[in-house]
Image: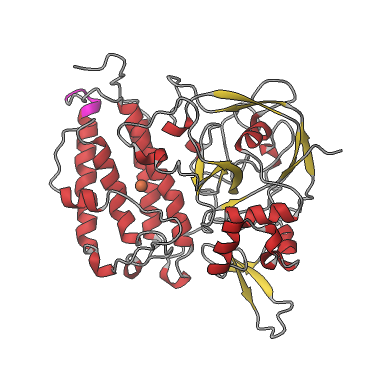
């Protein structure tokens, strides 16, 4: 029997969005030279070849038996490519390239799966194939689209670590000139912060985004911009990585045992035996340049927290970040930091606009009501909030581990977006999260402190 409240309509915009998301991920795999698709650029993750098969396997496993007939002639590959990995605290994968199927076989699987799904979705849309009615097509297709777009971002992190000689360089926009930005702190008055998403509203959201609620936030001061490379360099040059004072026990242990002494996106050039005046370079997606002083620094949560202690400040809570981004001097909350107009290229460095960051002051039109800039795009921002469910959380029955597997007290909420975050995820309720010792995310931070005296 059909559930009475399920809308079986297939919204017309969703299939074009799915096809566009496929174009994004296809283009990413094109960046990798064919002889390098079995590389593992990040030790904690699968080899690249896994992701070639994973995106289609996910769609098949999600949609078959729910929107589409439960028929697959590739059940072995459906299982092999079903799940990614995120080991915390060791247990790195040890599989070899020879453990994975041949590239031709994986690509044939991708094409076969895509053809099957497209045929089924077209039939569903013209009404010749009834859906099961348990979940709406809009919900499941949004999950498929956003899952793929999230991988379009995390694959970029991964390909960022791939040696340059293993990548094809696509045409890309020339870099923006540096925009000097004077760091200041901005007072945010006491007021409400809106978190979460209304259940049964029109907006798609993942399970962890529900339910909508409000939190009263005392006044605080927040950095106008994300912490810049030049500021982080002061911390590093002051001996920040060698001073136990600034690090929590777990973070210090991680840093020491992994010999972490600088951001993963920085490399030091030169050969000064005295250890002085060696120049730092930014390891970009396709080239290295001298570290741009006004770009945001990208670091792990552990490094961000150490910097904040050194600076006498702290990382914002998720609710403080929400207040700074969407709040206003009155009690109203904005739809976006800048107001109600939809996100576009004048508001921030997001939606695949660039492969690398830009200066933190490059988008004054993206400022919030309080004048806080660069909150969306140019790098996610770490918060001090441990990723946990909101009251009323219910896992998606068709993807129960999406959030719940990470409610382990070992992951922190990130807000905002990076230059490789799709525009559809720039909604107030979207929550990202990572474990604190993962250095490869396009993520920086800004600090908060008590109100300015
Ligand atoms: Fe996935």
Q: Which residue does the image show at 14% across and 39% down from the upper left?
A: 71
Q: Is 98 above or below relative to 9? A: below
- In-image side of 45 versus 260 (left or right): left
Give the residue furthest to the front: 249
Q: Which residue does the image show at 31% across and 60% down from the upper left?
A: 49
Q: Position of residue 30 (x, y in %)?
A: 37, 59
Specify the quadrant of the image occupied by residue 403. top left
Q: Position of residue 68 (x, y in %)?
A: 20, 32
Q: Which residue does the image show at 73% across and 60% down from the upper left?
A: 230
Q: Nearer the viewer, residue 221 or 367?
A: 221
- In-image side of 373 versus 55 (left or right): right
Specify the quadrant of the image occupied by residue 128. top left
Specify the quadrant of the image occupied by residue 265. bottom right
Q: Nearer the viewer, residue 109 or 115?
A: 109
Q: Looking at the magenta stretch, what is its main secondary structure?
A: loop
- Magenta residues, as a range? 124-128
Q: Position of residue 402 (x, y in %)?
A: 38, 40
Q: Was residue 229 drawn as part of the magenta stretch in this picture?
A: no
Q: Is 442 above or below relative to 215? A: below
Residue 265 seen: no
Q: Which residue does the image show at 26% across and 17% down from the upper left?
A: 3
């Amino acid at each position: 029997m059909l559930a009475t409240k399920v809308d079986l309509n297939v919204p017309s915009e969703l299939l074009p969005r799915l096809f566009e998301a496929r174009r994004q991920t296809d283009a990413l795999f094109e960046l990798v030279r064919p002889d390098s698709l079995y590389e593992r650029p990040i030790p904690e993750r699968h080899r690249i070849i896994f992701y070639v098969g994973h995106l289609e396997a996910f769609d098949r496993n999600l949609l078959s038996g729910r929107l589409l007939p439960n028929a697959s002639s590739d059940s072995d590959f459906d299982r092999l490519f079903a799940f990614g990995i995120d080991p915390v605290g060791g247990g790195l994968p040890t599989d070899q390239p020879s453990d994975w199927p041949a590239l031709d076989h994986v690509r044939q699987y991708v094409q076969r799966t895509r053809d099957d799904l497209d045929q089924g979705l077209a039939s569903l849309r013209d009404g010749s194939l009834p859906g099961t009615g348990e979940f709406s097509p809009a919900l499941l297709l949004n999950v498929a689209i956003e899952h793929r777009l999230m991988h379009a971002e995390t694959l970029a992190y991964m390909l960022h670590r791939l040696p340059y000689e293993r990548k094809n360089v696509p045409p890309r926009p020339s870099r923006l000139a540096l925009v000097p930005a004077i760091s200041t702190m901005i007072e945010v008055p006491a007021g409400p912060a809106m978190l979460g998403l209304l259940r049964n509203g029109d907006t798609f959201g993942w399970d962890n985004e529900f339910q909508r609620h409000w939190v009263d936030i005392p006044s605080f001061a927040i950095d106008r911009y994300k912490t810049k490379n030049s500021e982080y360099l002061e911390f590093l040059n002051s001996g920040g990585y060698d001073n136990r004072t600034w690090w929590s026990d777990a973070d210090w242990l991680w840093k020491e045992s992994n010999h972490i002494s600088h951001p993963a996106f920085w490399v030091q050039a030169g050969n000064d035996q005295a250890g002085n005046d060696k120049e730092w370079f930014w390891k970009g997606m396709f080239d290295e340049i001298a570290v741009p002083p006004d770009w945001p620094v990208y670091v792990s949560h552990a490094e961000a927290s150490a910097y904040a202690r050194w600076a006498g400040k702290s990382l914002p809570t998720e609710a403080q970040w929400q207040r700074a981004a969407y709040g206003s001097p009155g009690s109203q909350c904005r739809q976006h930091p800048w107001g109600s107009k939809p996100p576009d290229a004048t508001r921030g460095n997001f939606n695949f606009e660039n492969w690398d960051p830009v200066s933190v002051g490059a988008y004054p039109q993206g400022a919030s009501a309080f004048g806080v800039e660069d909150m969306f795009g140019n790098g996610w921002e770490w918060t001090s909030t441990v990723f946990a469910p909101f009251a009323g959380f219910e896992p998606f029955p068709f993807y129960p581990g999406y959030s719940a597997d990470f409610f382990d007290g070992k992951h922190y909420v990130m807000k905002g977006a990076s230059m490789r975050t799709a525009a559809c995820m720039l909604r107030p309720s979207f929550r990202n999260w990572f474990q604190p010792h993962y250095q490869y995310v396009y993520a920086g931070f800004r600090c908060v402190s008590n109100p300015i005296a």
